[in-house]
Image: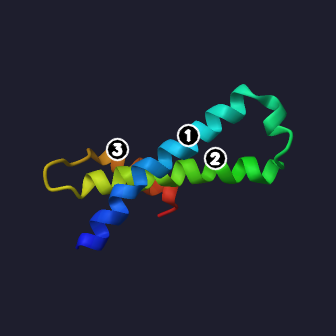
Amino acid sequence: MEKLQNIQGSLTPVLMTLTRLGTLLARQPELQEQLSEEDLETLAVLQEHFYALILIREHYRPDRELDDSELNHARKIMGE
């Protein structure tokens, strides 16, 4: 259980890092030019998947429950 909590706790910082990286790339086109289209697409997919994992994690917290639309959105991102 503790291991699961550690994994869950690390999702938010990873998403924040991916988001900051995406913002930095958007503000500095010269950095974007150094990355391939595949790299940029991978970054976008990682952001979406970490966001979905956070939504799913929130759904299973005992003190909070997502409404069905939030959970369905997360599942759609994850391809379920």
Foreground residue among 74 and 26 = 26
In primary-sequence order, the first of circles 3 and 1 is 1
In primary-sequence order, the first of circles 1 and 2 is 1
* Alpha carbon distance from label 3 to label 1: 23 Å
Assign a secondary structure to mark 1: helix
Q: Amino acid at mark 2?
A: Ala
Quadrant assignment for the N terminus = bottom left
Contact, mark 3 vs mark 1 (Cβ under 8 Å) = no
Q: Amino acid at mark 3?
A: Ser
State the scheme by which the image is colored. Answer: rainbow
Residue 39 lies left or right of residue 76; in this view the side is: right
Q: Is residue 31 above or below residue 7?
A: above
Label 1 or label 2, whichever lies nearer to me, is 1
Task: Name which residue lies at 73% across and 47% down.
Answer: 40
The circle drawn on residue 4 is: none
* Alpha carbon distance from label 3 to label 2: 22 Å
Residue 8 lies left or right of residue 32; in this view the side is: left
The image shows residue 52 at horizontal and vertical percentages of 44, 52
Q: Is residue 33 above or below residue 64?
A: above
Task: Name which residue lies at 20% across and 49% down.
Answer: 65
Count neighbours of disc 2 (C-alpha within 10 A) and say few if under 14, some if 14 to 19, many if 20 or more: some
Contact, mark 1 vs mark 2 (Cβ under 8 Å) = no
The quadrant holding residue 19 is: top right
The image shows residue 30 at horizontal and vertical percentages of 84, 32
What residue is pinned by disc 3? 69
What residue is pinned by disc 1? 19
Foreground residue among 50 and 65 = 50
The image shows residue 34 at horizontal and vertical percentages of 85, 44
What residue is pinned by disc 2? 44
